[in-house]
Image (cartoon, rainbow, N blue to C red):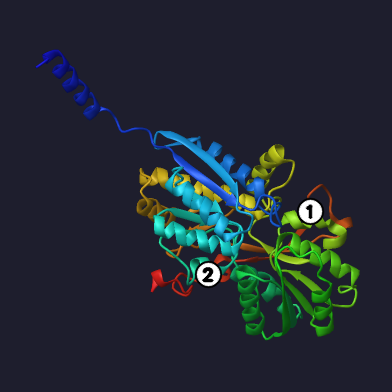
Amino acid sequence: MNFKLFSAALATTALIAIAPAAAEGVKIGILNDQSGVYADYGGKGSVEAAKMAVEDFGGEVLGGKVEIVSADHQNKPDTAVTIARKWFDVDGVDMITELTTSSVALAVQDLAKEKKKIDIVVGAATSRITGDACQPYGFHWAFDTRALAVGTGGALVKAGGDTWFFLTADYAFGYSLEKDTSEIVQANGGKVLGSVRHPLNSSDFSSFLLQAQASKAKVVGLANAGLDTANAIKQAAEFGIVQGGQKMAGLLMTLAEVHGLGLKAAQGLVLTEAYYWDRDDKSREFAERYFKRTNRMPSMIQAGTYSATLSYLKAVKAAGSKDTDAVAKKLKELPVDDAFAKGNVQANGRFVHDMYLFEVKKPEESKKPWDYYKQLAVVPGDQAFPTAKDSGCPLTK
């Protein structure tokens, strides 16, 4: 036997045994629409917001670097699942967030459950995510269809808008938003006179708007988002719907759509958001840093992605591990207080925080660039979102 070689092998084995654990770090995936109807709503701006969160956190966790990867799911659930599966199985992605489009979010959440990975939905709205479709590692961050319904639907009925007609996007998000708003309208003594469904990414809303006009409903509820909402509002102006006495309600509108429309077209719209850049010192400080990087003010989706990314990193640090159960537990234990919102995460994964009812300013009321909203009301988090027990989530039964 070659004793020199044997001794060297023993020494190498001993060194391996006493070596510290390898630095881990984490990899976070931003999966959203970067080229379609929701590109301004979240898009590449959400990727930039996530990078800001990583930088603000310090860039490292568990002794290793934090890496952001991103992809465009093109609003197709099958495309999203293919990307997410590769990220989880091959690329070592630990958490996926943003997930604009409800059908995409629900599909990726199912995969995350199967793979025992965390997903934090920011840009999709359906309340099913933390309701009947909840799962132990799934979280919902910025808003949902129920919170939007409580804010905009409840306020408009109380202000006299007691008859409604819906223009609804023909997929999971639209159905959920129409259903939740209808329930709030009816609970407040209002009536739903009808609805019509339109395909995602519609260019011509004329036939749908004519039906809304013929209904004589006091409020035309737009249960859609992104460019669909913007196009419907532009074409409604051509039909004289608002001039005829009906009110347009953007049930899911963000600063991005208002900016795209301009105040002349958007003035008077009532909407509900979780974040507005000019609401307080924290929101302004974040927004000004974001503006320097993107030349735009952040929407609630982009600010929400910042918050979701930062909260995940804090949970990993607190857990001292990337173990999914341990991190999910910390996400539900740690309070959230950042530039986006302040609140807590329920057992069903729902981040509960205040929502805000805004009215879009008239052009002459705007005093500076991006000065678009006046705040009408605060909707407390415990009114905007149901309790975990009342959410329909089977985990909380």
Q: Quadrant of the C terminus?
A: bottom left
Q: Could you tell me residue 160's position as x and y percent?
A: 76, 81
Q: Indicate the quadrant where residue 199 lies.
A: bottom right
Residue 338 visible (yes or no): no
Front-lying residue, 335 or 193: 193
Q: Is residue 328 left or right of residue 172?
A: left
Q: Quadrant of the N terminus?
A: top left
The extreme left residue here reads 1
Instruction: Check disc 2 and report the residue beneath it.
Output: 128
Q: Is residue 370 left or right of residue 334?
A: right
**2 or 1: tag closer to the N-terminus:** 2
Which amino acid type is shown beneath numbered disc 1? His
Q: Could you tell me residue 53's position as x and y percent?
A: 56, 42
Q: Could you tell me residue 19's position as x and y percent?
A: 27, 27
Which amino acid type is shown beneath numbered disc 2? Arg
Q: Label 2 to label 1, Cα distance in Å?
A: 29 Å
Front-lying residue, 19 or 291: 19
Q: Callout 2: few (<14), some (14-19), or many (20+) C-alpha neighbours within 10 Å?
A: many
Front-lying residue, 117 or 376: 117
Instruction: Check disc 1 and report the residue beneath it.
Output: 259
- Which residue is pictured at 51% across the width and 38% down the height? 67
The extreme front residue here reads 1
